[in-house]
Every structure is written in C-alpha cells, then in structure tokens.
Image: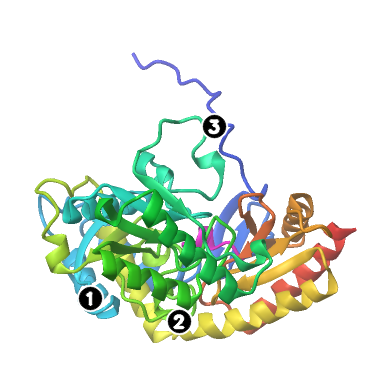
Amino acid sequence: MVEAARSDARLSPVLTQATSVVAARGEGVHVYDEAGRRYLDFTAGIGVTSTGHCHPRVVEAARRQVATLVHGQYTTVLHRPLLRLTERLGEVLPEGVDRLFYVNSGSEAVEAALRLARHATGRQNAVVFQGSFHGRTMAAASLTTSGTKIRAGIGPLMPGVVVAPFPYAYRYGWTEPEAVRFALRELDYLFATVTSPRDTAAIFVEPVLGEGGYVPAPAEFLTGLRERADRYGVLLVVDEVQTGFGRTGRFWGHRHSGVRPDIVITAKGLASGFPLSAIAAPAELMDRAWPGSQGGTYGGNAVSCAAALATLDVIEEENLVDNAAQMGERLLKGLRRVADAHPVVGDVRGLGLMVGSEFTGPDGVPDTGTATRAQAAAADAGLLLLTCGPYGNVVRMIPPLIVTAEQVDAAVEIWTDAVARAAG
C-alpha cells in the first residue's frame, strides 16, 4: 500500500528570491512569466545563459544527446562529447594550460583547484582578496569574503586562508594606480608577516570581483600577482567562473592583462545553463595531483558537454565575444549617463557585459535601500536585475552575450526611470 503524499512541502525560507517572477519559458534575452508577460533578463541566471535562453543550437545539441546517452560516468566510461569538448577547450585556453578535470559547479571547481594547488606545491596556505566570492561549500566558503552571510555560523572554517586587500579604488577614494600600489604593498606585507611564501600554495583571484561588487582587477594588479607568484613559486589561480566564456569582452577575463595563470577555473556560461564546470592546468602541474583525488559522479555529464560544444560554436560563429565588448561599452556609457543625472549612483564600472552601478549616500555611505528600490522598480517595469556587494548596494547587469543595441538601450531607458523613482 502506498502512503498518501503530504502536500505542505515548501522551499527553504532562507532561499530568498530577487523577484516575484515565476518563469514559464525563456527565449533569447527574454523570459516570460506564467501570464505571458515578457521581461528583459539582464541576470542571465547569474551569468549562466551566455548564448541566451534556449538558443536553438544548444537546445538541438542537448536534445540529440539526451536521445543517445544521458550519463556516462567518466571514471567508468568515456564518451565522445567529453573528448570533443576537451579538444575544443584546448583551442581557447591559455597555451600550455591544457589538462582538464570536470565537475558540476563553480564551488566544486574551486575546491578541486585548491586541492591540486596543495598537492602540487606541498604547501597549505591560500591568499584570497577582500570581496572575493569562490563558492559556498566549506573550503570555497573559507576562501570567500564577499559577505559574512557566506561564512557566518559554520565555523571553524578551513585554516590556511589569508585575506589581502583588493584594489577597489572607489571604496578607498583613490585613483586606480594608488589602489594597485596599496594592494600590492599590503600583499608583500602579508608575505612578510602572516603567510611565508614557503607556506603559500596559491593566490586565488577573480578578474572582476563578482558578488563583491563588480570591481575589475586592474591589469597592473594582475601583473603584480604574476610577478610575485613567479618569485615565490606560488600558483596563480584565476577564478573565471563568472568572467569566462566571453563575458568581459575577451574570451577570458584575465586576457585583459596578458597574464598567464597556472590554473583556470570555469563554470557558469560554459554550457549555456547546463551544469558543468572545470579546472585547467598544465600537464606537469596536473600530474602532481595525488591518485584518487579527482572524481565525482556527475562531472563531465554527456548532455552538459554537448551543450558546451554547441555554446562554443555559437560564441565563435555569432562573434559573441566581440558583441560583448561592443554592447558592454554601450551599456557602460548608458549607465554612466544615468549616474550623471542621479548622484545617488556613485560609481559605474565593469568589463564587457558585466557592469555594476554602486549606490552611495552624500557622505559616501553605502545606500542599500535605494539600490534595492531601483532593482525592484526595474523588475516592475520589465527588466530583471540583481544586487551584489557586501552591502547589497551595487546593482549588476549581466545580459546574455547575444544582447543587441536595441535591447541595451531599452534596458537603459527602464533603468533611468527606475533610478529616478528609487531616488525619490
């Protein structure tokens, strides 16, 4: 006899939603709710739907793969989509960074990168930067400083994590060169006082702070990290979970600086919405991972790999990296015009289609209330956005890479009205 199912199950109350929209379908840059209302989606699933919602090429690739092989566990059997994807990623990864390990989420990839760095160097400590976001699993949360909500109440956290300042020029009230000099000087001080380079396995850095407020890392800062990593034999790990796959107007965010990382972490836009992530490292480095230290049930899923292959095709054939650069510049200019008209928006910054507007009061104090009202007003008017930053006072725009000039202009128009309403 089958027991009657209970009907009072609910989502966790801790899992809050940024909007009240119940999405029924998505198409390109738009999502539609159950009543058929259309919204411009400038969240892209937090940077995931890189080729837009339900791109026909991605849908067809996934459909074919579902009918052929859904799951081929890749420590048991190999499958062709995984092998082809590995070859294709070798074409876009930095030269020599050509050995890959696949998992499902950004957090898992971060943990894998940390494990590899510790195995490869025989050292324990990791340097991260203030405002960093690397995930919510235990080690990844220990590396995360974008907000206490990720770390609070779960201690003790993993030891060996050292936090250095990030060159967040607007926060400090400095020029970018001043902020870079300060951040590198403080990193040197940490190496002298807190973590000996001989105990330091890796430096983890995002080319653009994500949850920390959409703050690009200046090229001079990344160059300084590379110099110190080389000097001390420390690995430079670049977290491209949100910045990779064309998001910043280059295929990888670190390419704006010309710096070559030792380990690259990728996820989010990799498979246009299907769960897939990876780390990449040179063969000599990956060979130092201890036997049995890499694995997982769902990593390198066949359907996700097929979607990732189609994503690469679409990015290349539709010139989406160039489009991200061009539309990102158009978006940045439009948002700066809004800021010029409304002093409550203290700073607008970003790279490519990863742009944030920071709300501050006349005294420079973060203005979370106005940012929240502006985000809600935009949603009411048909533009979906998210907030970020330690105080939730940065509103971010991350549309799919297929976004057009007309759609950018429509978003800026809605945003103009939303900020005016929020600012009162």
Q: Nearer the viewer, residue 360 or 194?
A: 194
Distance from the alpha carbon under mark 1 to that under mark 3: 40 Å
Callout 1: helix, strand or loop? helix
For the residue carrying disc 1, how many other residues have a C-alpha within 10 Å: few (<14), some (14-19), or many (20+)? some
- Where residue 122 sits: x, y (%)? 18, 51
Quarter of the figure that contains the C terminus: bottom right
Q: Amino acid at mark 2?
A: Val
Q: Amino acid at mark 1?
A: Gly
Q: Nearer the viewer, residue 162 or 12?
A: 162
Please tell me in which quadrant of the rendered image residue 397 appears. bottom right
Callout 2: helix, strand or loop? helix
Distance from the alpha carbon under mark 2 to that under mark 3: 37 Å
Distance from the alpha carbon under mark 2 to that under mark 1: 17 Å
Please tell me in which quadrant of the rendered image residue 113 appears. bottom left
- Chain-order first, disc 2 or disc 1: 1
Residue under circle 3?
A: 12
- Where residue 366 sits: x, y (%)? 73, 54
Q: Which mark is residue 90?
A: 1
Q: Which mark is residue 16?
A: none
Q: Nearer the viewer, residue 127 or 42?
A: 127
User: Residue at (31%, 48%) from the top-left corner?
Assistant: 125
Residue under circle 2?
A: 321
User: Residue at (57%, 53%) from the top-left corner?
Assistant: 24
**Horizontal relation, residue 422 to residue 102: left or right:** right
Callout 3: helix, strand or loop? loop
Circles 2, 1 touching at the beta carbon (< 8 Å): no
In this picture, which residue range is highlighted in magenta?
Answer: 42-48
**Horizontal relation, residue 267 to residue 355: left or right:** left
- Where residue 338 sits: x, y (%)? 78, 74
Quarter of the figure that contains the N terminus: top left
- Chain-order first, disc 1 or disc 3: 3
Q: Amino acid at mark 3?
A: Ser
